[in-house]
Amino acid sequence: MKKFFLLCASALFAAGAYAQISEEVVVMEVGGETPVISKYPSLKGFVSNGFWDNWEMSFRGGISMLSTSNLVFKDMPGDFGDLIGFEANFALTKWFNPVFGARVELAGGRFRNLSELDGHRQRTPYMFVHTDLMINFSNWAGGYRADRAYYAVPFVGFGYMAMDFTDRSHELGYPTNNEFAFTAGLLNKFRLSQGWDLDIELKGWLFGEKDLPRSLNHGGSFAAAYSITAGFTHRFNERTWRREMPQKYTDADIAAYTAAIAALEGSLAVARNNEKSLADQLAAANRALRDAKGKKEVFVNGACPAFFKINSAELSQRNKILLDMVAEEINDTPAEKTFTVSGYADKETGSAAYNLQLSEKRARAVADYLESKGVKADRLIVKGYGSSVQPFSGNIENNRVVVIK
């Protein structure tokens, strides 16, 4: 028994070392900032899932052994092979958070020993049902990770054990023996896929020796049983855990953000009006140019702008009408002439990195549309400048633009 618990302790130590090496820091972006959440799990740090989430169903099989307080393995009659029986078990586990859970396990099998009375083989059938507290030591020591490949899960529990309950045992003169038992062990879980684990369970349990069959009863105070089983676990419904959003902002901060959002919505309404006004001005200028030159010319002073809504790279219907005319004019120019499609974003909203990405998306949307209208891709040079360059002064909405030159 001492060797069994030393084995469990060694496995726990190795699991803790692995968990410390493989720990991660979870980062979430909140309001443009990136607060770091503690890598160590808190029982209050996760959003609990529903009742039917984070359940596991396990099936395992392996070997079992029996010893008494007076006779350890080396003193039991027979060779070591004479002491090896078998066990099969089924378990249902519910996890309440990434660290703690509870399970019910039903184990059944048969102990094998040699009787000291007459030397015949003793086969003792048993059933053991117990409920256990499960502790995910890897998540506790190293922080929760959904992609961890190995989990060390020690457990302790209490249950009810019955032996010699078969008709064959009764025919041989052995009465049914019932006993409460304490159990403890280590469950080693190896992640195979999102829904399946490979399990190796090391388990031991203690019960009163007085209820052993008389051929095995040596008058000691307790008996001990051990099992090593392997099998598979299926995890169903929701299998992961969501972290709670850290409370970083006061009520005053939230009120200020709400006011800022209202102001932005007002600015957006003004921008929409400005967009319509600019579109009308552009249409009027183009009409004037066509009337003056007798052709559809949309480039004013060598450039033509296409404006976008806030946080958008989607072409409006007005932009598409304008770009239809731009495509025709480009296709009328010599084939060796190239055009630059430059995207921008206003500097009043978004981070520099986000605005650079948005400006590139806007420029690419314009270039893709021109190519769909017959403009060769090698005639277009596509660039995004983000908010580092503001091509127009005045309203910030004027810089949510792609300029074609």
Image (tube, rainbow, N blue to C red):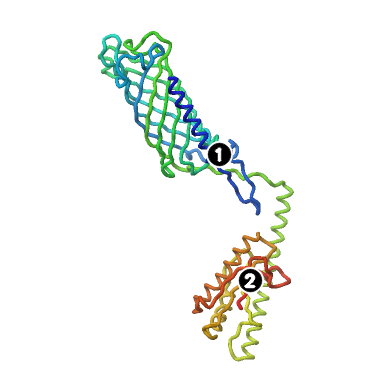
Residue 204 vertical placement versus 309 (above, below): above
Going by the numbered disc 2, the residue's amino acid type is Val
Going by the numbered disc 1, the residue's amino acid type is Gly
Where on the picture, by quarter, is residue 85? top left
Where on the picture, by quarter, is residue 58? top left
**Residue shown at 53%/86% (left/top)?**
334
Image coords of residue 297 (percent x, y): 60, 85
Other-residue count near label 2 (Cα within 10 Å), few / some / many at <14 / 14–19 / ≥20: many
Q: Mark 1 against mark 2, which lies toward the viewer?
A: 1
Q: Nearer the viewer, residue 341 or 312?
A: 341
Image quadrant where one finds the C terminus? bottom right
Residue 79 vertical placement versus 308 (above, below): above
Image coords of residue 260 (percent x, y): 71, 57
**Residue shown at 28%/15% (left/top)?**
170
- From the image, tell me which residue sits under label 2: 401
Image coords of residue 371 (percent x, y): 50, 76
Image coords of residue 70 (percent x, y): 40, 11
**Secondary structure beneath disc 1?**
loop
**Residue 287 left/right relative to 263:** left
Asked if the residues shown at circle 1 and circle 2 are in contact, with their CB atoms under 8 angstroms apart, the answer is: no
**Residue 44 left/right relative to 169:** right
Residue 92 vertical placement versus 354 (above, below): above
Which mark, by number, is residue 143? 1
Q: CA distance from mark 1 to mark 2?
A: 46 Å
